[in-house]
Amino acid sequence: MHTVVVGTSGVAASDVLAVARGGARVELSQEAVAALAAAREIVDALAAKPEPVYGVSTGFGALATRHISQELRAQLQRNIVRSHAAGMGPRVEREVVRALMFLRLKTVCSGHTGVRPEVAQTMADVLNAGITPVVHEYGSLGCSGDLAPLSHCALALMGEGDAEGPDGVVRPAGELLAEHGIAPVELREKEGLALLNGTDGMLGMLIMALADLDTLYKSADITAALSLEALLGTDKVLAPELHAIRPHPGQGASAANMLAVLKDSQLTGHHQDDAPRVQDAYSVRCAPQVAGAGRDTMAHARVVAERELASAVDNPVVLPDGRVESNGNFHGAPVAYVLDFLAIAAADLASIAERRTDRLLDKNRSHGLPPFLADDAGVDSGLMIAQYTQAALVSEMKRLAVPASADSIPSSAMQEDHVSMGWSAARKLRNAVDNLTRVVAIELYAATRGVELREGLAPAPATQAVIEAVRKAGVQGPGPDRFLAPDLAAADTFVREGRLVAAVEAITGPLQ
């Protein structure tokens, strides 16, 4: 099994995906263990002094003014975890929780949190055992960390609360720890706070969304090319010299992808109208500009994610010179903004894909295709309601594109009076990514049928490879009306699993 070694300088996005989705094992480097021990010595020395230090010998948030005596500090750390584990609503997905835990471990191993090495090792042991704490949808405002989600994870480290075992069954966390020979942690000064105070949930969801969107943007370039072909559009607008004079990198990449898909097609540039088209509709002609803008938004989001992956987000933090200082690095604004940006870009990509689908189905705009791509229009409805489904998905995505990060709601008796809502931005982005997959799948379904209905003209080799692969995947071609939902589900799986991109790349080589 693949192993990810966590050091003091952060991790890569590929490490997060390996642990969250691939079940990779986690190990602590010797460097990390040494840094953990050194930082803990600083915390222990401060804990022994009579002067109050936030997070070490005081309460938290609006209660930070109270000095906590030594005999109550272990109880204080237990209490913050128990009281903050206040999430409600549906369970969060297993991959999100694993990403959350791994990223918190990443920060702990930086040596800036003051957590003991044995606590960090327990975090790794729980991940390696396949134990996933039950985390709920609601409870984070994206500031002072993803507090409730992280608290539910910390609670499991203490042997309390519920968790899902490697068999998928939810049981008391203490039972699962015992079965795997893991001793519950006894939290000491600062450790409870250090386990809760990070942007790990929203960052984990950002990294997974970027991975999914990377495949989806390539998929959308492919379906746009298929639609162009089915509509007998022109590929001249994809010429590199046209995109070089507006040099947005994403735009050039999308145009290049579409051009690669359409290479050697006999369908492009043909017109069956009495008055030949001078140019195609915006949804066809401007596909690279819209998809490209989304790609460039993703590039910015990756920069933010990489910076966060190299960060140690906690409050207070242990500095190399021995100071323990309060700070505001837990504020989720940088991550929240790009999560919202991505939801906006995804909604627009879905919107333009839906417009192409609608054009394929409208006999007045499809340039010779049958109404709704039906076998016997009137007797058959064809893909009429598939487009309704796509339109409903797009409308939902437009609602999901409303920024969460533009909102703030005060908490903790006005001590935490401005928050990022980054967790909410991440949760809605996950929904948006799911819906975008379905929208692209419906365009794929319509466009492949449209291409097949163009008899007498050969599609591009890459297009033909897609049609053959998607038919083998259980997505049926043209014909009389049938139960459509299974076809759409199969198309969704085909896109979601990356098989659409794989089918094309087998002909074209790697897409951009």
Image (cartoon, rainbow, N blue to C red):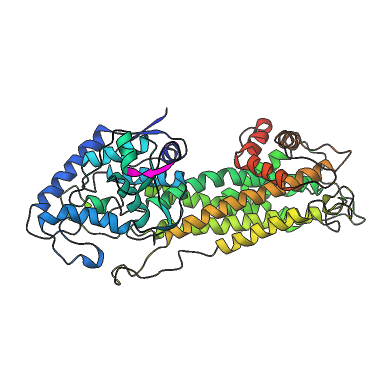
Q: Residue at x 65, y 42 (%)?
A: 257
**Residue 452 location (% of width, % of height):** 82, 41
Q: Nearer the viewer, residue 111 or 76?
A: 76
**Residue 380 location (% of width, % of height):** 86, 51
Q: Residue at x 74, y 55 (%)?
A: 387
Classify the position of the C terminus by image quarter: top right
Locate residue 346: give its quadrant: bottom right
Which residue occupies the extreme right position in the image? 274
Q: Residue at x 36, y 38 (%)?
A: 127
Which residue occupies the extreme bottom position in the image? 414
Q: Which residues are magenta?
A: 164-173
Residue 295 can be seen in this image: yes
Determine if the magenta segment contains residue 145. Answer: no
Q: Nearer the viewer, residue 112 or 79?
A: 79
Residue 224 can be seen in this image: no
Locate residue 324: give its quadrant: bottom left
**Residue 54 location (% of width, % of height):** 18, 59
Q: Is residue 254 left or right of residue 77?
A: right
Classify the position of the N terminus by image quarter: top left
Q: Nearer the viewer, residue 301 or 204?
A: 204
Q: How many marks?
A: 0
Q: Nearer the viewer, residue 215 or 75?
A: 75
Above or below: residue 233 compared with residue 127: below
Which residue occupies the extreme top position in the image? 1
Q: Is residue 360 left or right of residue 335?
A: right
Q: Is residue 474 left or right of residue 22?
A: right
Locate residue 464: give its quadrant: top right
**Residue 182 location (% of width, % of height):** 28, 36
Q: Residue at x 28, y 53 (%)?
A: 314
Determine if the magenta segment contains residue 171. Answer: yes
Q: Is residue 478 left or right of residue 224?
A: right
